[in-house]
């Protein structure tokens, strides 16, 4: 992805991005029911999506012996996930069995992935929470994914927590959750979110000083435009 866009997105919130996407009619881009295990240092998790999809396990095809195959989709996806990417896993919103565990997430981290997201759960969650990779899931499960889930598709369109995720879409995660930005509008969304963040910081400062939000947030009183311009000049924003 555009590295300038990555830098901009690391400094904005998923809340701001949700508003920018909503203005364009995109209402279902927030991945539902995932919480952070480990947050990135110095800003939001940002990277292009690399996807893995599970289906309900068929018992005769999902024994431990499948891990002997180098083409097994779960292991193959982990090994091929590019540096700088976020692996996004469609676990059918089912956290009863693990989407992955500490060893596979360690492999992603060592290969340079910046994050991993599942709408299911990660086993070894306490270990994953200490790793230098952002991670989001629904809740911890102990059983291996093989008990309920069968890895089937690599880097194809998926649904994760009710959000559509296409390979290459830009994934942003922070303390509020994870949002999906369609790749084709990521640059313009980043630019708009930076502008929105500057105004929100100005508003916070004004409200802390005692100002009312009426006419200020959103800006429906044009007199605030001049105040905002002066604030930006003062703060170099």
Image (cartoon, helix red, strand yellow):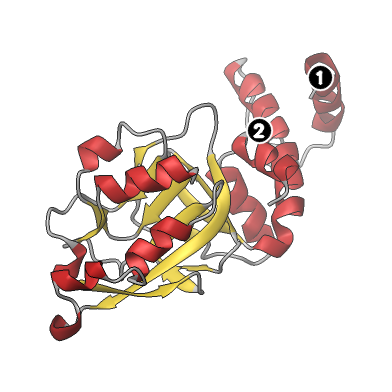
Instruction: Give the percent coordinates (x, y) of residue 205.
Output: 64, 20
Q: Which residue is depicted at the point 51% across and 74% down?
A: 157
Which one is in front, 18 or 171? 171
In the rendered image, which residue does mark 1 sit on? 236
Which quarter of the figure is the C terminus placed in?
A: top right
Instruction: Give the percent coordinates (x, y) of residue 90.
Output: 37, 67
Callout in the foreground (2, 1) = 1
- Asked if residue 161 shows in the view, the reply is no
Residue 21 lies, with reference to residue 113, above or below; the image says below
Q: Secondary structure at mark 1?
A: loop
Q: Is residue 213 left or right of residue 180?
A: right
Q: Which residue is depicted at the point 84% across and 36% down?
A: 222
Q: Secondary structure at mark 2?
A: helix
Could you tell which of marks 2 and 1 lies nearer the N-terminus?
2
Residue 120: image quadrant is bottom left
How packed is label 1: few (under 14 Cα within 10 Å), some, or many (20 or more)?
few
Q: Which residue is depicted at the point 75% across and 52% down?
A: 187
Which one is in front, 176 or 139? 139
Q: Is residue 64 left or right of residue 215?
A: left
Which one is in front, 134 or 231? 134
Counting labels gives 2
Instruction: Give the percent coordinates (x, y) of residue 234.
Output: 82, 14
How packed is label 2: few (under 14 Cα within 10 Å), some, or many (20 or more)?
some
* Residue at mark 2 to residue at mark 1: CA–CA distance: 15 Å
In the rendered image, which residue does mark 2 sit on? 200
- Asked if residue 121 shows in the view, the reply is yes
């Amino acid at each position: 992805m555009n590295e300038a866009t990555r830098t901009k997105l690391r400094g904005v919130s998923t809340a701001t991005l949700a508003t920018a996407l909503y203005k364009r009619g995109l209402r279902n881009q927030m991945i539902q029911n995932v919480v952070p295990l480990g947050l990135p240092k110095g800003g939001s998790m940002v990277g292009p999506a690399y996807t893995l999809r599970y289906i309900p396990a068929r018992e005769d095809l999902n024994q431990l012996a499948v891990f002997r195959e180098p083409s097994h989709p779960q292991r193959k996806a982990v090994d091929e996930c590019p540096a700088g990417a976020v692996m996004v896993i469609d676990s059918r919103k089912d956290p009863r069995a693990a989407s992955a565990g500490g060893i596979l997430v360690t492999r992603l981290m060592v290969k340079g992935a910046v994050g991993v997201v599942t709408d299911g759960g990660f086993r070894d969650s306490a270990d994953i929470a200490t790793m230098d990779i952002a991670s989001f899931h629904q809740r911890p499960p102990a059983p291996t994914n093989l008990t309920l889930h069968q890895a089937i598709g690599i880097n194809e369109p998926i649904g994760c927590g009710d959000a559509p995720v296409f390979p290459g879409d830009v994934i942003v995660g922070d303390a509020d959750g994870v949002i999906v930005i369609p790749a084709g509008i990521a640059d313009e969304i980043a630019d708009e979110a930076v502008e929105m963040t500057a105004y929100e910081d100005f508003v916070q400062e004004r409200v802390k000083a005692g100002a009312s939000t009426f006419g200020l947030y959103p800006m429906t009183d044009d007199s605030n435009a001049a105040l905002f311009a002066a604030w930006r000049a003062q703060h170099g924003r």
